[in-house]
Amino acid sequence: MIIYNVTVNVDQEVHEMWLAWMRNTHLPDVMATGHFLDARICRVLSVGDTGVTYAVQYTCKDLAEYELYSALHADRLRAESEKYYGVKAVAFRTLLEVIHTA
């Protein structure tokens, strides 16, 4: 399994609006692509950050499924976020391979 992790630092002034947009618009749009099994939003609990930081995680069955998502949908969905939030929600992305669960 693959976890597509998007860590996003959101300015405090747009934080509530961004979170509502993620829950009501962006996550449903990403899940509607059919490439992910589930999604979660986690708040990063660390002291000293500016703004509020989240880890948004999407799980897919394998790397090929992620690559299809990336090729067919990622640019469009990223552009939507940039259109609404620009530099007020700065993201970086990582791929994680699940090698063991208990």
Image: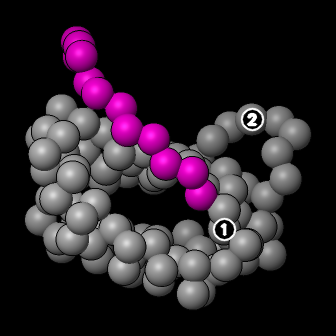
Q: Amino acid at mark 1?
A: Ala
Q: What residue is shown with label 2?
A: 46
Q: Is residue 53 left or right of residue 81?
A: right
Q: Is residue 25 above or below residue 101?
A: below
Q: Secondary structure at mark 2?
A: loop
Which residue extends farthest bottom? 83
Quarter of the image for the N terminus: give it: top left
Report x, y in % for residue 23.
42, 71
Would residue 15 appear left or right of 29 to someone viewing this image?
right
| Up/down of 44 relative to 39, above or below | above
Residue 23 appears anywhere in the view: yes
In the depicted structure, whether residue 80 falls above or below residue 90: below
Mark 2 or mark 1: which is in front? 1
Real-space CA distance between mark 2 and mark 1, rounded to the nearest whole angstrom: 17 Å
Residue ID for mark 1 = 89
Q: Is residue 101 magenta?
A: yes
Circle 2 Cα neighbour tier, 10 Å, few/some/many (<14 / 14–19 / ≥20): few
Residue ranking furthest to the front: 71
- The residue drawn where x is 72% and y is 72% is 87
Q: Look at 68% across and 56% down and name the residue there.
A: 9
When the figure is inspected, residue 5 is found, relative to residue 83, above or below; the finding is above
* Numbered disc 1: secondary structure: strand
